[in-house]
Image (cartoon, rainbow, N blue to C red):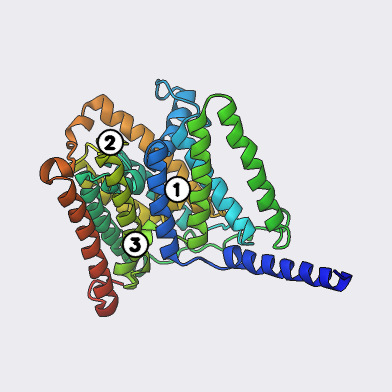
Amino acid sequence: MTSDTTAEDSDSISAAFRNGYERVFGKQWPIWVGGLLLGIGNVFLFAFDRPWTVSNGVRNWGDWIFNEIGVIQINVLPPNLFSSSVLCFGMIIGALVAALLGRQFQVRMAPARELFKGLFGGALMGIGAALAFGCNIGGFFSAISALSMAGVAMMFGLGIGAFVGLKLLVWEIEYLPATSWGAQKVPKVDNTSGASSKTQPIVGLVILILSIPMMLTYDAYDYPVSGGFLLFGLLIGIVMQRSRFCFVRAFRDPFMTGDAEATKAVVLAVIISVTGFTILKWTDLRSWDVAVQPGFWIGSLMGGIIFGIGMSFSGGCASGTIWRAGEGQVKLWDTLVTFALSTSYFRDWLVSSGLRSRLGEELFLPDLIGWKMALIIIIAIMFLWYLLAVWNGISKKLVVV
């Protein structure tokens, strides 16, 4: 083999690597790919331990803060040990890594009015999650996948809340003038001092490599579940950031523009997830009552409405807030803070007042109509949502903007 041949082989390998890298991190993934991977990932997460949830982890942050300052006196696992919290940390790291590898990380400041809307939206999301026994993930996505009627109720609540929230935002644009408070010049943030477009992939790779010993450390200290959740969170954050997967868009965009791509992606994710969950439960590989939330129907519906309004104001649901915060959106950092504090405080109030037990009941669909019909009903609901979104994309009958 000549030196020229060796050089050509080296160049071809290098070109193939660059092309592969650009396909994965240089271009946005189709959102349906995100739905496919997240649906499969939720099934694997349930098989590993328990389904995906975000509000439990975020609430742990609020519990820990309130416990430290003496507002709430409860036994709280530190956020670095509570597995759902670790998964949320993993999502932030994953989104950060994906943004850096894609040369997209940037600290994005927002006007004062938008920052306030982020704080307000996060507070509403926390209240809604406490009422519904979960956010758009634990209360809807994983719950409906677990054949819980509470998930169906929250789905309708999220749709109503997204509609109301969008109408309020339209009212704001029409009737609230752009005052100096709301339209102030957004300060420019210098990102070159951290990682420039050339060095961002290097920084992202370093963070990715450093996350490996973090996972192994959990296993070494007898916290293997937390280590596994960190890995799942990392992968979920990467998938969501690269595909721009967003539950807010799934519920809001049909009313705003008629676009149905995000809705189709969520439908795909739910169909995959509910099929996998049904197999795991029907075969007794996992307990039937897991993720069957006790909020049907009042808590789930009302919580969904309040959560839907909140996510419209903040611009991100629970999972969307996490990954957008990871890629540098300051408004979503605000949302994350009030989301954590409000869901912790309001849930504690619901428990101490005795109201939490009155929000509804557990309703496991197979107990009513059997496994086969339960799966068919959930898939049918998703298919009808898909058809409605497609019809609206053509007719624009439900567009309110």
Q: Quadrant of residue 217?
A: top right
Q: Residues within 10 Å of mark 2 (few under 14, many from 20)?
A: few
- Between the residue at mark 3 and the residue at mark 2, the CA separation in whole angstroms equals 32 Å
Location of the C terminus (image quadrant):
bottom left
Q: Amino acid at mark 2?
A: Asp
Camera-nearest residue between 23 and 89: 23
- The residue that disc 2 covers is 284
Q: Residues within 10 Å of mark 3 (few under 14, many from 20)?
A: many
Q: Please say if 23 is above or below 345.
A: below
Q: Is residue 222 left or right of residue 393?
A: right
- Label 1 vs 3, first from the N-terminus: 3
Callout 1–callout 2 Cβ contact below 8 Å: no
Callout 3–callout 2 Cβ contact below 8 Å: no
Q: Quadrant of residue 395?
A: bottom left
Q: Is residue 81 left or right of residue 343?
A: right
Location of the N terminus (image quadrant):
bottom right
Q: Residues within 10 Å of mark 1 (few under 14, many from 20)?
A: many
- Between the residue at mark 1 and the residue at mark 2, the CA separation in whole angstroms equals 39 Å
- The residue that disc 3 covers is 250
Q: Secondary structure at mark 3?
A: helix
- Label 1 vs 2, first from the N-terminus: 2
Q: Amino acid at mark 1?
A: Thr
Q: Nearer the viewer, mark 1 or mark 2?
A: 2
- The residue that disc 1 covers is 335
Q: Please say if 316 is above or below 340.
A: below
Q: Secondary structure at mark 2?
A: loop
Q: Position of residue 297 (x, y in %)?
A: 17, 44
